[in-house]
Image (spheres, rainbow, N blue to C red):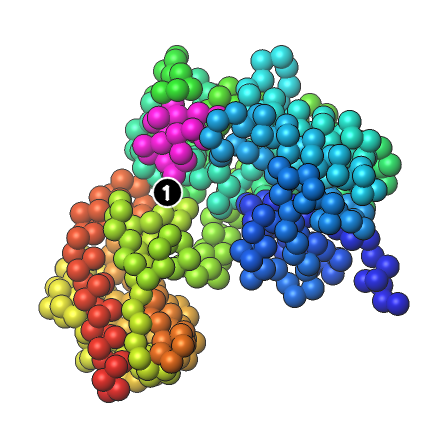
Amino acid sequence: MTTRDLAPRILLTGATGYVGGRLLEALESRGLELRCMARQPDFLLPRVATSTEVVAGDVFDRASLAAALAGVHTAYYLVHSMGAKGDFERGDRTAAANFAAAARHAGVRRIVYLGGLGDGTDLSKHLESRQEVGRILRESGVPTVEFRASIIIGSGSLSFEMIRALVEKLPVMITPRWVGAKAQPIAVEDVVAYLVGALDLAHDESVVFEIGGSDCVSYGHIMKEYARQRRLRRLMIPVPVLTPALSSLWLGLVTPVYARIGRKLVDSLRNPTVVNDDSALRAFPLRPMGVTEAISRALKNEDREFALTRWSDAVSSPGVASTAGGGSRSGSRIVDSRAARVDVTAIHAFRPIQRLGGRVGWYYANWLWWLRGLVDLILGGVGSRRGRRHPEWLRPGDTVDFWRVEAVEPSRLLRLRAEMKLPGRAWLQFEVENEGAGAKITQTAVFDPVGLAGLLYWYALYPIHTVIFAGMLRAIAREAASGQ
């Protein structure tokens, strides 16, 4: 019998969510006997390790929970309905009651739950619901470890993306009262560390831990620190009133957050979310980082995580050019992806891609590429005079006109990073994969704008970019099909 056979089985719900996805990776790295529950297992299967079991289950269907919880020692409950329409509090209440009853019946030894910080009698509906869920789980009789966290800082977290979008898009911000509310932001890495640490906790009874970073600051301070690290100048003008309804509509216009979610977030932001009980610092060997380091890590990790992600996955309709709103958004980045199928193998489809730039050119509207290089040269940039090292082969670090090769995998991938003068950062990526008797070429342009100038640049040139990128992909497909 192996150590793994003796290890307690862990159930993770919410593995497709923001925190759950990161917790999944951390739990798998510990070699635990892990099971994930999902409403659509087929969607989750490609994301998990081969050693992780994935089962179907729905917290709104109590009968489906029995198999998922069978033989489980510790269950992570990372489920909430804030994005749902209608009465989300009732949905959260029903889901928690179903899960609690099923966990008790299955003999689960511990539930670990992530809720929200906040105290007092005037809590928002969102925070009230989060804390009610914790209470329902504790009252089940199954020992429950409830973590209550303030704003979570990490690339992709809802609150952080809201703050990021406001700072990136608005050089002048009319700030309502909630911007002055105190918070104790915590890095997502520290949240995951607490959640993993709950496995080793000696408590045999239910306990609530308030967790936060080392700094107690206002939302306005977080915005200013983000702007400082992004080297953006921002003017904030406070006003005495701005209702949650108006704020949510405003957020819906200028951030990726839907208005209904924005309303719930803004309503919650009026409540201070600071740690009043430091028992977590005594119970866990963890000292959370401050807001400056948390934002810095979020920005650095964003580049790494984004590079490891298939950019084309950010587009809702693979293979179709994104046209709504000037491209799809992924965090602060704007993504434009399109695909073409060719009746040749991936090896042959990749050949024209690896010859891009230099004397061969860009296969479509070369005079526009030449003009862009000339403008860049006039502005003090590198222009397109550098050409390329070799007409056929590329390696990481090579120059291709005013691009640099960031990654290349023969017959599969080429990613170029722009080195021309831009109000932001840009990448151009090509992926090739066999598909039946032929291959699919996916071309993705990504722009990470800096401030208002970056957004104006992208949207002003988007019609031209659409024509150029679409024409280039068609020409590459023709070139690949011709076998030259």
Query: How many numbered marks are there?
Result: 1
The image position of residue 73, as x and y in percent, is 81, 47
Vertical order, 308 against 293 (above or below):
below
In the image, farthest residue toward the right: 1
Residue placed most toward the observer, 163 or 290: 163
Question: Which residue is at a point 80% across and 43% down the rendered structure image?
Answer: 106
Question: Which residue is at a point 35% across and 55% down the rendered structure image?
Answer: 317
Which quadrant would residue 187 be assigned to in this image?
top right
For the N terminus, give its image quadrant: bottom right
Which quadrant would residue 141 be assigned to in this image?
top right
The image position of residue 101, as x and y in percent, is 75, 34
In the image, farthest residue toward the bottom: 484
Residue 255 is a magenta residue: yes
For the C terminus, give its image quadrant: bottom left
Q: Amino acid at mark 1?
A: Arg
Residue placed most toward the observer, 243 or 358: 243
Q: Main secondary structure of the magenta part?
A: helix
Residues in magenta?
Answer: 247-264
Residue placed most toward the observer, 246 or 385: 246
Label 1 crowd (10 A; few <14 / some 14-19 / many >=20): few
The image position of residue 455, as x and y in percent, is 26, 44
Vertical order, 457 against 469 (above or below):
above
The image position of residue 282, as x and y in percent, is 79, 35
Question: Which residue is at a point 38% across and 23% down the rendered structure image?
Answer: 247
Q: Is residue 22 left or right of residue 108?
A: left
Q: Which residue is mark 1?
A: 231
